[in-house]
Image (cartoon, rainbow, N blue to C red):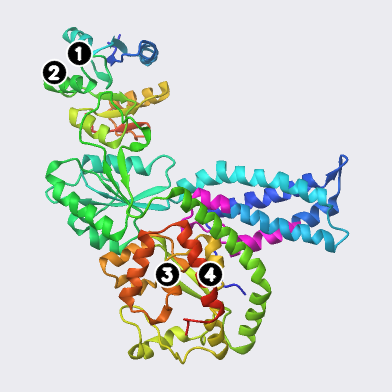
Amino acid sequence: MEVPRVALVVEDDPRLQAVMKRHLEGMGLRVVASFHYRGAIRELETATPDVVSVDLELPAESGYELCEHLRRQPALAAVPLLVTSARAFPADMARAEEAGANAFLRKPFSMGQLEHAIHMLLADVPAASSSWVRRLRYP
Amino acid sequence: MLSLRVSLDSGQRLNLALDLLVVAAASLLAAVVDGQLHWKVALLMAATAWAFWMAGSRVLLQYDVSNGRSLGGDLALTVLLLLAVFVPMALLRHVSSHYAAGSDIARFLALLVPAVLCIRLAVVGTRLWRKRPVDCVLVVGAGVLGRLTQRTISDGRQRREVVGHLRFDGEDADKRLRAPVLGLAGEIDEVLRGRVVHEVYVASTDPHHREQVQRVVGWCETFGVPFALPLGGYRFARATPAREDTAPDGYIHYLSVRNKPLQLFLKLLIDAAIAGVALVLLSPLLVVVAVAIKLTSKGPLFFRQERVGLHGRTFYMLKFRSMVADAEALKAALASRNERTGPAFKIARDPRITPLGRYLRKFSIDELPQLLNVLRGDMSLVGPRPALPAEVAQYEGWQRRRLSVRPGLTCVWQVSGRDKLSFSTWMLLDMRYIDHWSLWADLRLILLTVPVVLLGRGAS
């Protein structure tokens, strides 16, 4: 049997995290989830994700820090990285892109939009951005 | 008779078809009395309503998107059009006994107005917004922020389009830009001279671009073009501006004209009301003049001339023809006799003017068709006179600020001696009007214009 691909979901809203987790598992992914930066760092010691979804607004360190941490690790520097945030001004997306994000998903988003974004990042094909999912750079 | 060429694209045809369908449906429903449909009444109502709707929409350019109307303006025009349909129907009722009863017409209108407005808001409005963006945006900055700003402006339901980017000196253009790079940030004055731009976005938070941004801001202020600066070059993990309307799209928006939204809105309403009433009251005079023009000289009734409107978008200004039919061709031969300084052209005893034209001009009757331009939203009652494209091309930088407001029928210049002033004095008067504009000043100018026109003072 094929080994399922791994998604790391960092989201501090427990309800949203649960829904995202269930939905990504429905897509055939194995999901590792965390509510904050430190939890995510701990998960990364044992798991090597194929795709990461990070909320920018986290309780202690922000999502930007996690993006930069990922990009500093040689093993994770190229992992597709999705940033989610309710703040989605062009300047915020530019900052996220600088921090290493590959795509930006504006909150609140539907699970269909999440699925579209994850597919876009995993499929390695240039899928179209929409007004919700903004492709920042290719992994 | 009216040489108002209207070419409709598919969106506009859908628009017109929907409106006519609603008119027909409203007629049918209005003609149902006691559960019985009166076919004759329904057909008569639909036919008259269609006729007046078609005529009204042609005159007001209702289905022409090229004149840059906002949704609010479009709705205002629709209400006018509904009135243009309703008034003759109400009058017809008194003329013919076969025609619908008053209650039918009242029901017709009660069904029609909300239906048309809803369709316009929900269906046509959104369709048109996607179909043809009307406001042109220039993005200064061709980097990551420039690209993301372009994408944000161009998608969704905004009625705007990015016409191009300007690149900062020393900045590499992003490879994924969707709009063309038109030049360097330092060349913004030339770019703004050459095209219609409604707003300039400065998409850079790089401190190295500070001086270039300052120059861009300077030119925007000189030309009177609105501009937007990014909120900040910082990361925000949770903070948002204390007031939500500070920066609706992450940019702080600046205007170089006085921002008086309520007064401006009232001005648009007053424009439409006065122009509409004036056209009705003056209609006997207009008909007499139209017949006289047709009888006394060969050529069209109206003189239709391209003029520069708000933000440099051109429109066709209407006048009663007061010159011989080939007057424009004769202009070059008379260039040496020009009595105006600067780019404007005027001769006191212009040989191209017809005898009737001289009277029309003396009492400014030739200008009355511009009330239609006011209804169409091209012009306002009070504002700087719209200039010819050739004149605008010769403007100095600061003079382009005239284009930051809607042009008008009358302005300070018209009530202060008119033709006796030099070009630069005229421009300075217009700037003073723009910088100190208020609704009360406008009403005063309208009142001051009336005696000038009635006494035939000023115009030659």
Say what secondary structure mark 3 lies in: helix
Mark pair 4, 1: CA separation: 71 Å
* Residue B412, disc: 3
Other-residue count near label 2 (Cα within 10 Å), few / some / many at <14 / 14–19 / ≥20: few
* Residue A12 seen: yes
Marks 3 and 2: in contact by CB < 8 Å?
no
What's under tag 1, amino acid-wise? Thr
Q: Is residue B25 left or right of residue A43?
A: right
Q: Is residue B426 left or right of residue B264?
A: left
What's under tag 4, amino acid-wise? Gln
Q: Point out the stretch of residues depicted in magenta.
A: B47-76
Tell me: residue B261, above or below residue A83: below
Between disc 4 and disc 1, the foreground one is 4
Question: Is residue B68 part of the magenta span, yes or no?
Answer: yes
* Residue B370, disc: 4
Residue at the spot 77% in from the left edge and 48% down from the top edge:
B106
Marks 1 and 2: in contact by CB < 8 Å?
yes
